[in-house]
Image (cartoon, grey):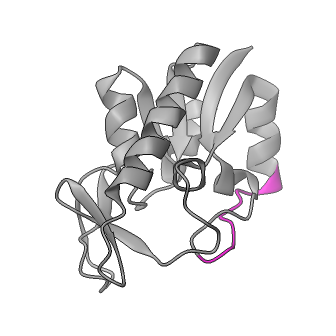
Amino acid sequence: MEKLLISACLLGVSCRYDGGSNALSEDVLTALRARYDLLPVCPERDGGMPTPRIPSERRGDRVVNRAGEDVTLFFACGAEKALDAARAAGSTRALLKERSPSCGSGLIYDGSFTGTLVPGDGLTAEKLRAAGIEVFGESRTEELL
């Protein structure tokens, strides 16, 4: 069965910055599980960030939290761990949480904490793509089914 790296929050794991999740519907999860061996990752948590945590956004090559602290190293560490997990499993695809400073794909928040979206990728999505892994946001889940 093909391995699919997936943001843990999409599976219902309470690892979002606010302690919540972004669980996909049970129908979608059932369909994904029928086709893939799901490999959950949470790059923020896996990189050493607590849950809950201060919200963070990407500003260029850096990631900062709402308090103004540079948390890039946590995000970079988590991205590296996600890539390691994908490589170890032989995964060539990833389904990641959109708009996240880690997992966002195509559009991310601009770093102003005003809800403004700009073109770009989170650190993990960027690292996975650079390694040749195809990245999908949750709005593109149907393409994987």
In the rendered structure, the answer to whether residue 114 lies left or right of residue 36 reads left
In the rendered structure, the answer to whether residue 118 lies left or right of residue 122 reads left
* Residue 37 visible in rendering: yes
Is the residue 77 above or below the residue 102 in the image? Answer: above
Residue at x 23%, y 70% (from the top left corner):
110
Farthest residue, direction left:
60
**Which of 96/58 is in front?**
58
- Magenta stretch: helix, strand or loop mostly: loop
Q: What residue span does the magenta drawing correspond to?
A: 18-26
Residue at x 19%, y 53% (from the top left corner):
61
Is the residue 28 above or below the residue 113 in the image? Answer: above
**Which of 1/77 is in front?**
77
Residue at x 29%, y 86% (from the top left corner):
114
Q: How many marks?
A: 0
Residue 86 percent across, percent down from the top left: 55, 24
Please tell me in which quadrant of the rendered image residue 31 appears. Answer: top right
In the rendered structure, the answer to whether residue 60 lies left or right of residue 65 reads left
Is the residue 112 above or below the residue 29 in the image? Answer: below
Residue at x 70%, y 56% (from the top left corner):
24
Q: Quadrant of the N terminus?
A: top right
Is 144 included in the stretch rendered in magenta? no
* Residue 104 visible in rendering: no
Please tell me in which quadrant of the rendered image residue 37 appears. Answer: top right
Residue 16 percent across, percent down from the top left: 61, 67
Residue 116 percent across, percent down from the top left: 26, 78
Q: Quadrant of the C terminus?
A: top right
**Which of 41/116 is in front?**
41
**Which of 57/49 is in front?**
49
